[in-house]
Image: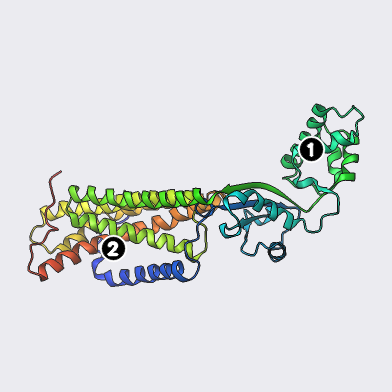
Amino acid sequence: MEFFRNPNIDFLGKKWYFLAFSLVFSVAGIFSMLFWHHIPYGIDFRGGTLVYVKFSHAPNDNEIRAAMDHAGLKNARIQRFGQASNDEELIDLSLQETSEQALERGKTEIVNALEHNAPAGKVDLNNAPVLTIKNYLVDKDPMHIGGDEQKYAAQAQAIVNFRDKDHSGVLTSFDELKGAPGVDPAVVQSLQDGFYLSDFGVRNVEIVGPQVGAQLRRQAMLATVYSLLGMLIYLGFRFEWIYGIAAVVTVFHDTLITVGAFSLTNTPISLTVIAAILTLIGYSNNDTIVVFDRIRENIKLMRREKLSDIVNRSINQTLSRTILTAGLTFLTVLALFLFGGEVLHGFSLALVIGILIGTYSSIAIAAPILVAYQDWRVEKGKRPVAMPGRAK
């Protein structure tokens, strides 16, 4: 299948436009990483406590931030999680606010900050664990069964299951418990004496220590460097060293723009984002090798023509293949980005940006580097190296 029949686009003639485009986005990303948002490491790399909170109403970010400030958590990050109709927020306690030994305390401080209007002497049922509810019931013995711990543990578990599974972690009225399967009415009546219902419930907590975060950050950097080094060595033996250098520069360009985009949008970089970046390194390299392979074949067939003409011809010959494969892959990751949910948001965003930039750079960055390097060698009176490569 071909989208274009015998295209004759002068890609190298537009290299300065491509260079300007790349410079604008690269410089913007670098400035953002250096002076604005820096590299927005996710909790995987920073360490800290990440609390997913479900509210019974549409949350007000300003009120939540004011509650965090009042509790002394002035650098807590607050952002909407999932769809707006879910009424969920992410509260992120940065590493500077805690230590490895106090990560659990950091989570408790966030919960306490949101419960600043709690009635004296009562416990929040929306955030109470099974053990707390069981111990209360055993002490009060509302069913008059002699404080049977096993039976009251079953009652407590039924309450928590009903709260978390049927009401997404937030009960708005004790009357809702009257319809809970397996919960005795006497238990419901007793709970009102010792518990109250806040307007939020903690759905999930992620805790990463600072040492683990630093180790993951180092490993992610090494994985990226090793992949670039392996690519350089492979292409150096497979073609010529200039091909490997061009491919590595191209992939570095793609990675820089992708990370810069995350910095500009202040989107956290997590482990899944690093996986996506490593994926796009391979994807971009594959596109680049296809173009390089066609250049090498055409060099053997068109020995008397200028390298710039050969490169242009090669890009045009592979253009349909590039558009077809990149287009189908892009549609897949775009669907993942639009419908994959919040968990896959960073991963899919990196792939969306990476595929667009990777396809563009294979044409607009990698090939012009070959021509520019050979022109430089000719000017210096040296033998061109971008001529017929090593045999397969």
Q: Answer yes or no: do the residues labelled 2 and 1 have beta carbons within 8 Å? A: no
Element class at badge 2: helix
Residue 87 seen in the current view? no
**Residue 52 in picture, x, y percent from top left:** 65, 51
Q: Nearer the viewer, residue 327 or 218?
A: 218
Looking at the rendered structure, which numbered label has been put on residue 159?
Answer: 1
The residue lying at 23 percent from left, 49 percent from top is: 233
Q: Nearer the viewer, mark 2 or mark 1?
A: 1
**Residue 239 in picture, x, y percent from top left:** 18, 50
Q: Is residue 325 left or right of residue 142?
A: left
Looking at the rendered structure, which numbered label has been put on residue 225?
Answer: none
Above or below residue 37? Residue 170 is above
Residue 131 seen in the current view? yes
Dot 1 crowding, Cα within 10 Å, few <14, some 14–19, many 20+:
many
Above or below residue 127? Residue 295 is below
**Label 2 – label 1 distance at C-alpha:** 61 Å
**Residue 392 in picture, x, y percent from top left:** 15, 43
Looking at the rendered structure, which numbered label has been put on residue 365?
Answer: 2
Q: How is the image coloured?
A: rainbow
Task: Name the residue type under label 1.
Answer: Ile
Q: Is residue 97 left or right of residue 45?
A: right
